[in-house]
Amino acid sequence: MFECIESGPDRVVLTLTGILDGDGVSLIRGGFEEISASGHRDVVIDLSNLTFMDGSGIAAIGFLFKRLVAAGRRIDLIGANGQPARLLNEMGLSGVFGIVNKAQRRPLFSRPGWALAR
């Protein structure tokens, strides 16, 4: 599920591949929990190699998003395309998660704590 994990002192980049459904989420759940407990200030999830995502995948990303934002940390999703991008757009979540295509490489979501202000 994780094609690649790159880590620095303040940043971790996860590249997800394949299918993020109930089975896929069960494979990454522990990793997401570990990242939420880590000291990395910035988390980037690259979705460019993700071919399918359902509600379970969105819930898993939402879980990580809420934990990171509550801790004053930042999460950026990049590279969504195809069915995952359409699903996120249809659900109105592309703005919430700051989805950008890989060519842009500039995360749109850069306001930690926005959810706390709602």
Image: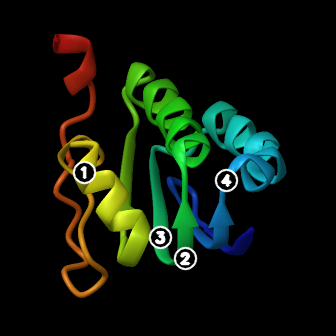
Q: Quadrant of residue 93?
A: top left
Classify residue 46 as left or right of residue 109: right
Mark 3 neighbour density, 10 Å: few (under 14) some (14–19) many (20 or more):
many
Read off the residue under disc 4.
21
Question: Can the viewer see residue 18?
Answer: yes
| Residue bearing the label numbered 3 | 46
Using the image as rendered, state which of residue 59 and residue 28 is in the foreground: 59
**Mark 1 and mark 2: Cα distance apart in space:** 16 Å
Give the residue pinned by disc 2. Answer: 51
Q: Which mark is residue 90?
A: 1
Count of marks placed on residues: 4
Q: Calculate the distance from the C-alpha at mark 1 to the C-alpha at mark 4.
A: 17 Å
- In primary-sequence order, the first of circles 3 and 1 is 3
* Residue 85 x/y as whole percent: 33, 66
Q: What x and y, as percent, mark residue 80?
A: 37, 71
| Marked residue nearer the N-terminal end (2 or 4) | 4
Which sits earlier in the primary sequence, circle 1 or circle 4? 4
